[in-house]
Amino acid sequence: MAECAPNNDAVTSLSWAPSASLALLRRRAQFLTTIRQFFAERDVFEVETPILSCAGTTDPHIESFATQSLAGGQYFLHTSPEFPMKRLLAAGSGPIYQLCRVFRNGDCGRIHNPEFTMLEWYRPGWDYHQLMAELDALAQLLLGTQAADRLTYADAFRHCTELDPHTADASQFRQCARQRGINLCGDLGDNVDAWRDLLLTHLVEPRLGMARPVFIFDYPASQAALARTRDEKIPVAERFELYYRGVELANGYQELIDPIQQRARFEADRAIRKQAGLRNVCLDENLIAALQHGMPESSGVAVGIDRLFMLVEGINRIDEVVAFSWEQA
């Protein structure tokens, strides 16, 4: 076997050292212990599921890391433990949570790291408003904040842009972006969801949760992801996100449990990926089979632990709250 020689041009004398102090890492360990105690007191049990999967995410906005098995076949590092956890729910697990490393082949920056720690949990029999209340209790415990505010996606959008995100068209979003001085490398055309996302990240998110955390809920139905949609005059997705000081901390759903709808959404995602020239990803047939068996009505949420700990510690960069930054991995 060939020896690996160090690249002296790329390695500095201090590159071996942790990017976070040992004192902070000890506080992080206690932080994780507090989370586990929170769930133990509520009779939610901790589970472990595979990090490698034969199916990657079909989400067009998330890219999986791929690896090749010597035994044959391609596997993907999970971007979330969601699918196997739902299989446990279908098997009758009851309420469960998981603290694990997840991997997303994308941005690296102040609040993004391709490898990060996620807390994910599910509550069978609960609706997403009940889950918001439980997440609020955890946030108050960890952040020392007051109870979170709640705003619909539409109200938050109207407050910051004076547009109704459910009824505005691409030309109205474009005009708003120009008036607010948002510079684009190219035009987004008639892609209403792309315009929504642009204005959300530039005009809405930076103003969210400045005094206390805030939940944004009932997203456009076209942004349902894996959430159930509710048929109204204007359909909405029963989805929520938690923000604090302009940072997105959590994404939760009233879970979609219909296997036919789930397969249709997977296939729609794959069509979008193909059109965009992204890697073809097989859908997770194990999840579909679990839904066909019968998954109970459930709500679930994923929380970015590194971001949450950043806010607890008053630190501005994600690489300062992990043992080793992405560049040092």
Image: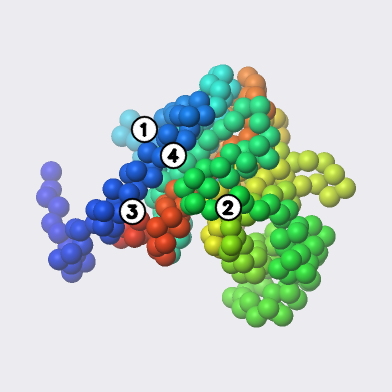
Q: Whole-Å distance between the Cαs marked 2 and 3?
A: 27 Å
Residue tagged 3:
322
**Badge 4: few (under 14), some or many (20 or more) residues near its Cα, within 10 Å?**
some
Q: Residue 79's x, y, as percent?
A: 47, 44
Where does the image place residue 142, in percent across and percent down from the top left? Answer: 47, 47
Rate crowding at label 2 as few (under 14), some (14 to 19) or many (20 or more) other CA atoms within 10 Å.
Answer: some
Mark 3 residue element: loop
Residue kind at label 2, given as amino acid type = Gln
Q: Are marks 2 and 3 in contact (CB under 8 Å)?
A: no
User: Mark 1 or mark 2: which comes first in sequence?
Assistant: 1
Disc 3 marks a residue whose amino acid type is Val
Q: Secondary structure at mark 4?
A: helix
The residue type indicated by label 4 comes to Ile
Residue that label 4 marks: 35
Which residue is label 2 attached to?
Answer: 146
What distance separates the C-alpha of mark 3 from that of mark 4? Answer: 17 Å
Q: Quadrant of residue 320?
A: bottom left
Find residue 72 and name its label: 1
Lateral position of residue 222 relative to residue 301, left or right:
right
Disc 4 to disc 1: CB gap under 8 Å: no
| Nearer-N-terminus badge (3/4) | 4
Mark in front: 3 vs 4: 4
Judge depth for marks 3 and 1 and give the one in front: 3
List the single residue furthest toward the right. Answer: 233
Q: Is residue 49 left or right of residue 251?
A: left
* Residue 96 visible in the snapshot: no
Residue at 65% x, 21% y is 294
Q: Mark 4 and mark 1: span between their CA atoms?
A: 38 Å
**Gap between marks 4 and 2 measured at Cα:** 18 Å
What scheme was used to colour the molecule?
A: rainbow
Instruction: Give the label, 2 or 3, closer to the camera.
Output: 2
Front position among marks 4 and 2: 2
